[in-house]
Image (cartoon, grey):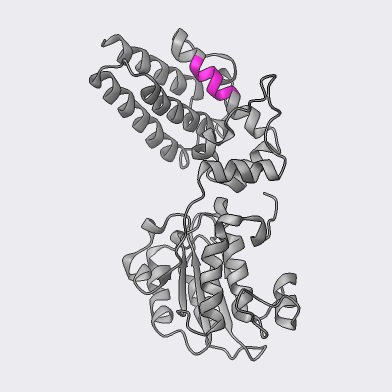
Amino acid sequence: MTDYTLTQLPWLATAFERFAKLCYQNQHSHAQLIPVDIALGGIELATEMAQMALCVDKTPVGACGICKACLLCKSGNHPDLHWVRSDGNQIKVDQIRELCQSLLHTAQQSGARVAVIEQSERMNIAAANALLKTLEEPGANTLLLLQTDTPASLLPTITSRCQKIAFTHPTKTHITDWLDALDLLPIANAQGQRHDVTWCLGVVGGPLKLAASLQSKHYPQLLEYRQDWSASLQSGHLQNSLLKLTDIQIIDALKVLYLYLRQYVLKSNKLNPLIQSKVIELAGDVMHMTHKLATMANVNTQALCQNYVLQFRHVLALS
């Protein structure tokens, strides 16, 4: 994904402004929970918060940007900024123990010590438990920033020790306006209309990833999946792109199917309640399968897709 500055992500402005004001007044909590998905700019927000905390010439609206601490942060070389990322799919206990040990040392720049834990929901049980003492007794002038894509996945013992950053998700209109400002929206048709690209947010995960998708061949591929699912569900036979899915592509294709089935129910006013519930149930099965596929080595993509087509046809036959 393209690197963005915080000023380029307007939906994060209010959340940062609140933190900046508290940090300037030295009234912020030593542990901050950032419930902002990476695809919404969670890393950019954590980065800006860390720089604000380390800045030696803070302003009420953010870091000064020109002091030695700020310059070190921008270069990625600040010795008192500790960043933890998952090792594979997990953040392991040794990583957290090493972090906690580092935070015991005196700050090398004679200022704050800041730790950012990226996708903190990936901490395994042992890692989360190892962090508890530091969350309770972090030491003077220490700030822990826990960014998370899925706050509900964190242990209550972790969240209860953090101050949660208030964040409001951008609306589809806000996202469309943002993409328009970046000149990433498709060309309008002869009537001056553009199709709504936000339909696939549930597939890509958020506006930053949607922007990356629009800048690559990924978005046209998602459109093709949607068109081919529509044709396949009508005919009863797999069409075009669905006949040649790879193990990697199948997850995106099934996420598109899930969205299609949900929209089918919303747009089909004449469906009786039984058919509606069955289609929604099938959509749930599809989403459950996408989670399972993340840990499956191999899958017969054609057989799987054809099975969902047949199930859909069987449901409609109930009417």
| Residue 278 located left or right of residue 63 | left
Towards the viewer: 199 or 121: 199
Residue 170 lies in the magenta stretch? no
* Quadrant occupied by the C terminus: top left
Residue 226 lies in the magenta stretch? yes
294 above or below 15? above
How far from the left and from the top, in percent, is residue 117? Answer: 52, 67
Q: Residue at x 58, y 64 (%)?
A: 45
Task: Quadrant for residue 175, please give it.
Answer: top right
8 above or below 246? below
Q: Residue at x 38, y 57 (%)?
A: 153
Figure label count: 0
Q: Is residue 9 visible?
A: yes
Task: Quadrant for residue 190, please give it.
Answer: top right
Identity of the residue furthest to the left in this view? 274
Q: Magenta region, mostly helix, strand or loop?
A: helix
Q: Residue at x 70, y 51 (%)?
A: 2
14 above or below 37? below
How far from the left and from the top, in percent, is residue 242? Answer: 55, 20
Q: Which contiguous range is marked in magenta?
A: 224-230
Towards the viewer: 90 or 176: 176
